[in-house]
Image (spheres, rainbow, N blue to C red):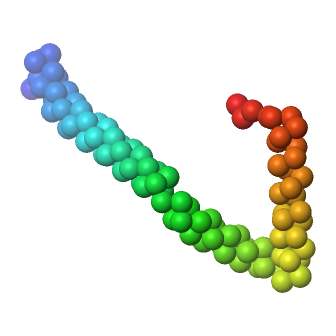
């Protein structure tokens, strides 16, 4: 049996069409995900108390990681150094007004 161009074209169409549909589905899923993320960002911006809750959760995770790596005393020293750096960092930002690129 010989394959003609028409047979090859039919086989390629059968292979390409599902790939196109998969690509379209993927793009739609990405768009929906991006829209959901944007909505969540807007909700967080509207509710500053949620921002504090998120920061607290991140702080707890950070603390636990430091305790695992440095122990309790090492973690206390690390947090002291971080707290001390807040004022210095703000003064630096006010003085030099760096930009993020």
Residue nearest the observer in this picture, 8 or 33: 33
Q: Is residue 19 left or right of residue 63?
A: left
Front one among 35 and 23: 35
Q: Quadrant of the N terminus?
A: top left
Image quadrant holding the C terminus, namely: top right
Q: Quadrant of residue 5?
A: top left
Residue 3 in view here: no
In this picture, residue 101 sits left or right of residue 42: right
Q: Pick the residue in front: 78 or 29.
A: 78
Q: Is residue 3 left or right of residue 23?
A: left
Relative height, residue 31 to residue 3 (above, below): below
Image coordinates for residue 9, horizontal then vertical, percent: 15, 21
At a point 25% along the width and 36% down the height, the residue shown is: 24
Rendering coords of residue 30 (x, y %): 36, 43
Against 85, residue 21 (above or below) is: above
Residue that sits furthest to the bottom in the current view: 72
User: Is residue 81 in sight in this rendering?
Assistant: yes
Residue 83 percent coordinates (x, y): 84, 65
What's the residue at 49%, 52% (across, down)?
45
For the point 82% across and 49% down, the residue is 90
- Residue at image position (72%, 35%) is 100
Residue that protrudes farthest toward the top in the picture = 5
Relative horizontal placement of residue 33, taking residue 8 as reference (left or right): right
Q: In this rendering, is residue 55 above or below 9? A: below
Give x and y (percent) for residue 2.
12, 22
Number of residue marks: 0
């Amino acid at each position: 049996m010989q394959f003609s161009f028409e047979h090859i074209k039919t086989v390629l169409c059968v292979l390409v069409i599902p790939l196109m549909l998969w690509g379209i589905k993927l793009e739609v899923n990405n768009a929906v995900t991006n829209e959901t993320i944007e909505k969540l960002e807007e909700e967080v911006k509207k509710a500053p108390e949620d921002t504090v809750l998120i920061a607290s959760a991140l702080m707890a995770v950070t603390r636990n990681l430091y305790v695992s790596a440095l122990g309790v005393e090492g973690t206390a020293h690390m947090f002291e150094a971080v707290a001390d750096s807040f004022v210095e960092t703000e003064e630096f930002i006010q003085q030099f007004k760096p930009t993020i690129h």
